[in-house]
Image: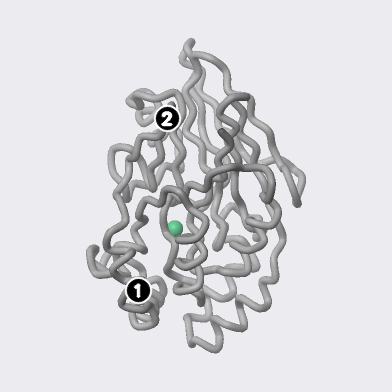
Amino acid sequence: MRYLILSDIHANLEALEKCLQLAQGKYQKVLCLGDLVGYGPDPNAVIEMMQRTATVIIRGNHDKACCGIMNVEDFNPWARQAIFWTCDTLTPNHLSFLRNLAPGPLTMPGFEIVHGSAEDEDQYIFEPAEAIPALRNQSMQLVFFGHTHHQGGFSLNRAGVFQKISGGSRRNGRVLTLDLEDGTRYLINPGSVGQPRDGNWRAAFAIFDEAERRVDFYRTEYDIATTQKKMTQAHLPEPLIQRLEFGR
Ligand code: ZN
C-alpha cells in the first residue's frame, strides 16, 4: 500500500490541487493529519476536495477552533481573526463535518498518525527535547505527525542515536527519500500543504510506501498569487497573506 500523507492544508486550494497533481499515480490512499482549514481563503472547497479523496482524516487545532470545540483564546490575534472568518464562511454541513473528525492518535496498519503528538494532539514537536521522549514512548516504529509545518522529522536507532531529518536541497518534485531501517523509530512530518514554515514556500507532502518501507518527501510550486488575492478579497490579515511567500 502506498499512502499520500497530507497535513496542514489550511484552506489553501491552489496548493492542495498542485500536491494532488504531482502525487497522481504514486499512491492508493490519502491520509490527512489535520488542519484542513484556518488561515486560507477556501475552507469549503478544501473540505469538499478532501471528502472526495481522503480515506482517513484526523482533526487539527484549527479544525477544532473553527467548529467551536477549542477555545480561540489559545491562538494569536491573526490566527484568531482567520478562525472567526472561517467559522462564518463554512457551510453548516462542513462545520458539522469538522466537529465529527476523529482525534489523533489513530492507528493504521503498522504505523500511527497524529496531529501534534501521540501524547497530546496540540503539542508541537520542534526540538530534540520534545522529539526524543516521543520517540522513546511510541509503540510503533513509525508515527506521522504535523502541526509544526516543518517537513522532515526525527529518528532514534537501537543504539540510542538520535537524528534530525530535514528536506533535501531540490526545490521541486521529490526532495528526499528515506529508507526505514529495522529497529529504528521514526517521527515523520510530511510538511504543510498550505502554509509551510520551514523557510521554503513550496507546498509539501510525503508518500509512504509500506511494502518498500520508504518515505518520499515532495515539494511543489503553486499559484501563490491567486491564493493571496483571494485572501485580500476576504479581508484576511495581511501578515497571513505575506507569510505564504516567505514560507515562515
Ligand atoms: Zn497547522
What residue would you read off at disc 2? 109
Q: Is residue 205 above or below residue 216?
A: below
Marker disc for residue 245: none
Q: Quadrant of residue 66?
A: bottom left
> Quick check: marks 1 and 2 in contact, CB under 8 Å?
no
Pick the quarter of the image with the C terminus. Answer: bottom right
Residue 20 at x, y percent in the picture: 63, 56
Which of 109/34 is in front?
109
The residue that appears at 39% across and 82% down in the rendered structure is 89
Q: Circle 1 — which element?
A: helix
* Residue shown at 34% from the left, 40% from the top: 106
| Residue type beneath disc 2 | Pro
Distance from Cα at disc 1 to Cα at disc 2: 36 Å
Report x, y in % for residue 121. Answer: 31, 47
Colour scheme of the picture: one colour
- Residue 219 in percent (x, y) is at 68, 51
Say whether residue 11 is left or right of residue 201: left
Q: Which quadrant of the figure shows ligand 1?
A: bottom left
Looking at the rendered structure, the number of numbered marks drawn on it comes to 2
**Residue drawn at (37%, 50%), measured in percent from left and top?**
58
Count residues near mark 2 (Cα–Cα under 10 Å), then give few for <14, some for 14-19, many for 20+.
few
Q: Is the CB–ligand 1 distance for label 2 below 8 Å?
A: no
- For disc 1, the marked residue is 80
Q: Nearer the viewer, residue 126 or 59?
A: 59
Q: Bin the neighbour count of mark 1 within 10 Å (Cα to Cα): few under 14, some 14-19, many 20 and up.
A: many
Q: Quadrant of the N terminus?
A: top right
Left or right: where does residue 122 sit relative to residue 171? left
Question: What secondary structure is marked by label 2?
Answer: loop
Percent across and percent down for residue 75 are 33, 66
